[in-house]
Amino acid sequence: MSATETARNTVALVGPPNSGKTTLFNWITGSKFRTVNYPGSTIDYNLGRAHTRYGADIDIIDTPGVYSLFPKSSDELVTHEVLFEKKSSDIHHVVIVVDATQLARNLYLVRQLQEAGYSYTIALTMIDLLRKDNMDVNLDKIAKIFNCQVVGIDGTLGGGVPELIESLKKTQNKNIVVKKLEHWNEDKRENILKELELLTKNLITKQKNGKLSIFQKTARIDKILLHPVAGLFIFAAVMIVLFSSIFWMAAPFMDVIDGVFSWLAEITKKTLGDGLLSDFLSDGIIASFGAVLVFVPQIFILFFGIGILEDSGYLARAATLIDKPFSKLGLNGRSFVPILSGFACAVPAMMASRTLSNKRERWITNFIIPLMTCSARLPVYALLLSFVFLGQAAWKPGLALAALYFGALLVGAIAAAILNRMLKKEAKSFFMLELPLYRRANFRVVLKNAIVKTRSYATRAGPVIFTLSVLIWTLSSFPKADAPDATHRLEQSYFGQMGRAIEPVFEPMGVDWRVGVGLLSAFAAREVFVSTLSVIFNISESSDEASMQNSLLEKMHNAERSDGQKVFTTASVTALLIYFMIALQCISTSAVAIREMRSWSFAIIQLVVLNVVAYVLAVGTYKILS
């Protein structure tokens, strides 16, 4: 935060994950806030101001959810630094958010804030869940025990928020002396937890009505959803629904975005006519922005779906189910959703890995995400499999496509296992989640968070993707940008020259420079490989879709290398399939890797390793099959 942002009275919201902290933040700020990236970290937190209707000049910081102020993860480290690494005047008060259904565990944070000397108020959330179950919590007793203001919050309707703001007004300009916490040993932690367990037994009262309590209902549901066998099948079904929705729900919106930018490019060409400026604006600028924004629907649906699962309390269960098998690969349960999302697109998948608190596990997860079979590979797979199985039964290429998907998972698992052995374990990995009660997701909050995260993608990754896309256009257009023939222009371009220069590199895969140019152009987007081959082999864009594909397949069958051998054979095409299955050919993915990991070295290592391994395996495959 800048000096101007901390000049006013600032209140920090602190609390465990799933405690309703962010929901409370939305009520206080009226959903008008901005996401801030903490300096030196990939972790985001929200910064907003109390809504004007409350008449309070207060800045609110929504810190990452934590279980303890003794940091063991990136999230906890950021919250710790916000509270203790700044001047005490930066934060004059803390609102500690406590889930009434997890009272003993959540009050553990209150004890830590007490010892640190912070002025604080307890915001008791989820009390509406207790009251629906004819249960109540004694706020006055909690206030007396912890010597602070206690305000009950109804996260669904916003009840208690005005009272909380009035309480915060009274704390403004209060001088406090904050000290860093001395380490708590195991005995002290256990004693405090036991003390809190005893305290909470007398804080919640229940009226007997013969009905199951919300705790009992949750326990019964968990017997099914956390079953070691049935739970995994249910989890798989839920993830498949989420995964498939990224495709079919996003497709119409992606088509609209693609159509709008295609229309803009066409209008630009018609208005400016043929020429370098027209090509630069339409094929460079407009097409590049379209390439950035076309991912937005997928990213929004991904984060919205994850938000629904998280807010309902199910995602915590899913993470515990998958934790054990993933632990064998150096990962934990949180890694599954980002990896699964990689089958749609690596860009939102890497952004979803922000939920991983362990830096080492996030490193492994983001490294293997590009190995998942993203949607951009499908046009390439469809073309190459159509070549191999031309005229054969439809189930054969379908079975081969399924094998490619399973192969990607297998290669990803092997890569994770290797990295798990190679990377130094600086700190013991741990996976701890409190299982919240099941509840109806707050649609408004989930929607707002999904929009914020989606906007973060566009504003952060967009400029890098745009710049690199323009670079690719430049390399494929010059120095013969004014050549009327597209094929001649591509052959004489820097890309074409590079293709001929490194043709010896592609020959061991059984292909020539024309396929090499296609592989180079695929770094802009994998599906560009198909359109590049269409240009090289003079496939008319005026043909209908079916005849275009048949014409291209025919050209591929007849294509010969300079030595008279066929370019496309079963051996060379299989080698290409292996290469595309493993290689990292996506500028967008590398750009986001730099942003998310805050490391050029990570992106470069990933790019080099995956492409070298893909090349070696492709060459080996060709040598064996030929």
Image: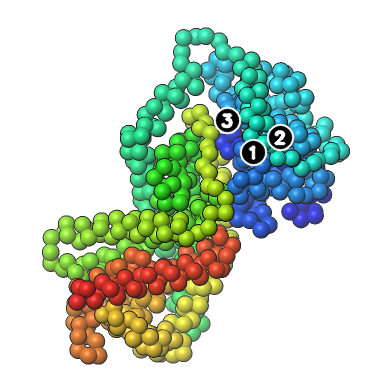
Q: Which percent across, then down, holds residue 532?
A: 34, 77
Q: Which of disc 2 and disc 1 is earlier in sequence?
A: 1
Q: Residue at x 51, y 78 (%)?
A: 471
The answer to whether 276 appears left or right of 232 in the picture is right
Q: Mark 3: which amino acid?
A: Thr
Q: Which of disc 3 and disc 1 is earlier in sequence?
A: 1
Q: Name the residue under label 3.
A: 156
Q: Which percent across, then down, holds residue 381?
A: 28, 65
Along the line of sight, the residue nearer the viewer: 279 or 310:
310
Q: Is residue 533 above or below residue 606?
A: below
Q: Which residue is drawn at 56% across and 36% down?
A: 18
User: How far apart, in angstroms, are the residues tagged by discs 1 and 2?
Assistant: 8 Å
Residue contact between numbered discs 3 and 2, judged by CB atoms under 8 Å = no
Q: Residue at x 72, y 47 (%)?
A: 82
Q: Which percent across, then down, holds residue 417?
A: 41, 56
For label 2, the SS is helix
